[in-house]
Amino acid sequence: MKPQMLLMLRIIWAALLMGQIIFLALILAGVVPHQHQTQPIFGYVSLIMLVTIVPITFGIRAFQLRRAADGSGPANGVMNGNIIFWAGCEGVSFASMVFAVVTSWSTPLICAVAIAMALQMVTFPQQSAEI
């Protein structure tokens, strides 16, 4: 992977993650007002999103990385696969945080936000020897 491509990918990764961190900080600091009526359906929807969207986008990422590694796909497949996966994680995280604003924090919402953000954090773009 070219150094410019790697730098651009790292900037995208950081920008996506910073948006989530800032929104979470605003919610936890009380800047964003939220309701205190618990609606369990939002927790279930959040967990369903977590167990469907994240594995699907991870599969797309793996497919794109495999194609780029064996040369059968475009060189920017690495970027595309990573961005798709990060967008899936970000979607789950933001949806869960919005659900928390609409209702209140519950264990499923906390788990969905934590897992989605953690998965995005551990996929920091690095230079790979085989690509």
Image: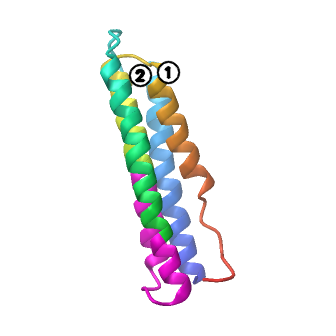
- Front residue (pair 58, 119): 58
Find the residue positioned furthest to the top. 37
Amino acid type of the residue tagged 2 in the rendering: Val
Alpha carbon distance from label 2 to label 1:
21 Å
> Would residue 71 be counted in the magenta stretch?
yes
Whether residue 62 is situated above or below residue 73 in the rendered picture: above
Q: Position of residue 98 (x, y in %)?
A: 34, 30
Q: Position of residue 73 (x, y in %)?
A: 43, 85
Amino acid type of the residue tagged 1 in the rendering: Thr
Residue 104, quarter of picture: top left
Q: Secondary structure at mark 1?
A: helix
Whether residue 96 is situated above or below residue 78 in the rendered picture: above
Q: Please give left or right for residue 50 compared with residue 127 in the image.
A: left
> Would residue 100 be counted in the magenta stretch?
no
Q: Main secondary structure of the magenta part?
A: helix
Q: Residue at x 56, y 71 (%)?
A: 7
Q: Residue at x 42, y 41 (%)?
A: 50
Q: Secondary structure at mark 2?
A: loop
Q: Position of residue 42 (x, y in %)?
A: 32, 25
Name the residue tied to disc 2: 31
Residue 48, quarter of picture: top left
The stretch in magenta equals 63-88
Number of numbered labels in the structure image: 2
Find the residue positioned furthest to the bottom. 71
Name the residue tied to disc 1: 107
Which circle's residue, 2 or 1, is located before the other in the chain?
Answer: 2
Whether residue 43 is situated above or below residue 19 in the rendered picture: above
What is the quadrant of the C terminus in the image?
bottom right
Q: Please give left or right for residue 22 compared with residue 100 in the image.
A: right
